[in-house]
Amino acid sequence: MRVLVIGSGAREHALLLALQRDPEVTGLAVAPGNAGTARIAEQHDVDVTSNDDVVALARAVRADLVVVGPEVPLVLGVADALRAAGIVCFGPSRDAARIEGSKAFAKDVMAAAGVRTAASEIVDTPARLDAALDRFGPPAGDPAWVVKDDRLAAGKGVVVTADREVARAYAASLLEAGHPVLLESFLDGPEVSLFCVVDGRTVVPLLPAQDFKRAGDGDTGPNTGGMGAYAPVPWLPDDVYRDVVANIVEPVAAELVRRGSPFCGLLYAGLAITAKGPAVVEFNCRFGDPETQAVLALLESPLGQLLYAAGSGALAGFGELRWRAGAAVAVVLAAENYPGRPRVGDVVVGSEADGVLHAGTARRDDGAIVSSGGRVLSVVGTGADLSAARANAYDILRSIRLPGSHFRSDIALLASEGKIRV
Ligand code: GLY
């Protein structure tokens, strides 16, 4: 089986490494990729937001399966274009990708499926902002305002604050730029990401993971695309995990089938485990980053065969997934100033070690690997438990050099100490 992976992050590097372990995968291509993926897959510099270019590339590399990493090509309909060309694709149609691309659609689907989620309101004019802020946040009994950019924002367009002025200023800046704002009630409780492989009605859950969105230790600083993750999640009771699959993900998948937009791909449920039980923070239509780096490090089942089964509607016959015992921890090494405009072009030393996945990297003409984006590497450690996996990840990180770079030192720390409770 020849597989083409679309995307350029550490998530795609992790997908390629897991695909490479599948004995039925005979060839790997990636577009556009990065300096790390170039070592394991044919690299093609195509515009992945052009459906025509992706279909032409899939034909040129004779792909039996295309796996789409990022949400933007999916929301633009790349999976529809590939299927129309007779190519098996792991990724939802444009219609089904609205579960991430349109917050109003996602809320509507969840309401119809009877799924608990945050109360929300779209504000599209400054005149409505103050009254809407009054309906959310601490005065209404919640501990914080949650203000979201109502467009695809790669996880970065969210401000959670107990300070009304901060909430107002962020919302006003979005409105001034002509972007609608989504206000949500705050969901209290630790968060979990649950990835499910879906082929319409059949739902196959992967190991749960937790990611870390804030830039600084102790969940301080601005929101980022994700600074680290770990899997599995020892504090998540099995019955809650089963409850999420049976009463959240399966009903949402069934509701999408009922609406004529069956979801075929990776349905990512971002959940808060509240005192009243699990509630959905958001759905995404693709693998999460950096959780994928941790989850796939533990997958023993053949990923290519799993994703091909989903892409061709044969998931029901795939059987139970097998997982390596133990835990995995992914720590993101970010460039100076990330999540602001990152410093780029610096030489990265030590990035070819085992467990190092590339994201914002490029190979310079002289062969050196240089930084080319905000999140530069994901370093994945594994071990018998979270403590051992953490130690492994931070050991690898110590051998990497990138001027001005930063990383969080507390990824998976509280979970490894048994300090997270639901
Ligand atoms: N881990 C957050 C995301 O992938 O959106």
Image (cartoon, grey):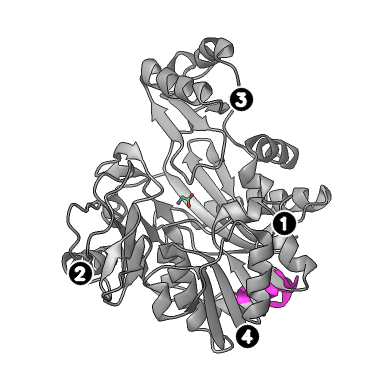
Q: Amino acid at mark 3?
A: Ile
Residue beneath label 1, please? 93
First along the sequence among labels 2 and 3: 3
Distance from disc 1 to disc 3, alpha carbons, whole Å, reads: 25 Å
Q: Residues within 10 Å of mark 3 (few under 14, many from 20)?
A: some
With 336 as the anchor, is 161 left or right in this view?
right
**Magenta span has 340?**
no
**Magenta span has 311?**
yes
Distance from disc 1 to disc 2, alpha carbons, whole Å, reads: 40 Å
Q: Amino acid at mark 4?
A: Met
Residue beneath label 4, please? 1
Q: Residues within 10 Å of mark 1 (few under 14, many from 20)?
A: many
**What secondary structure is found at the residue carrying circle 2?**
loop
The stretch in magenta equals 306-320
First along the sequence among labels 1 and 3: 1
First along the sequence among labels 1 and 2: 1
In front: label 2 or label 3: 2
Main secondary structure of the magenta stretch: helix
